[in-house]
Amino acid sequence: MAEEVVLTLYRRAYCHLCEDMERALAALALERRFKVTVVDVDADPALEHRYGERVPVLVGGGRELCCYRLDLEALDAYLAEIR
């Protein structure tokens, strides 16, 4: 059985771009067979410092896949690469 793919979405609560990306990922997750862990950057001072206003950021396998807007091409390329 293949290992489950888990992506990490770094976001903050008051960010409309973050909400947009989270919704888009939720709509794709079942079809493209991945799960998303959502991390609030404001809950961790180190993450808040690292990302600042540069959210949302989608990470897979320790690699940044996209930020601000969902890049479907980058997401699909990553999923194809690891499967």
Image (tube, rainbow, N blue to C red):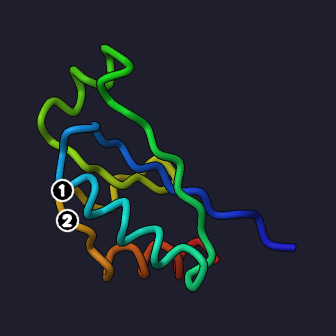
Residue at (59% x, 71% y) in the render: 82
Crowdedness near tag 1: few (<14), some (14–19) or many (≥20) residues, C-alpha within 10 Å: some
Q: Residue 2 at x, y = what percent?
A: 79, 72
* Viewer-nearest residue: 27 or 52: 27
Quadrant holding the N terminus: bottom right
Kind of residue at disc 2:
Arg
Instruction: Find the distance from the CA under tag 1 to the CA under tag 2.
Output: 7 Å
* Viewer-nearest residue: 20 or 80: 20
Q: Is residue 57 left or right of residue 3?
A: left
* Mark drawn on residue 76: none
Where residue 49 sits, quadrant-wise, is: top left
Give above or below for 32 relative to 34. Answer: below
Q: Is residue 54 left or right of residue 65?
A: left
Crowdedness near tag 2: few (<14), some (14–19) or many (≥20) residues, C-alpha within 10 Å: some
Give above or below for 10 relative to 58. Answer: above
* Mark drawn on residue 17: 1
Q: Of circles 1 and 2, which is in front?
A: 1
Residue at (12% x, 36% y) in the render: 53
Residue at (20% x, 39% y) in the render: 14
Marks 1/2 in contact by CB < 8 Å: the verdict is: yes
For this orientation, the residue located farthest to the left is 53
Name the residue beneath numbered marker 2: 69
Q: Is residue 59 left or right of residue 80?
A: left
Give above or below for 29 relative to 64. Answer: below
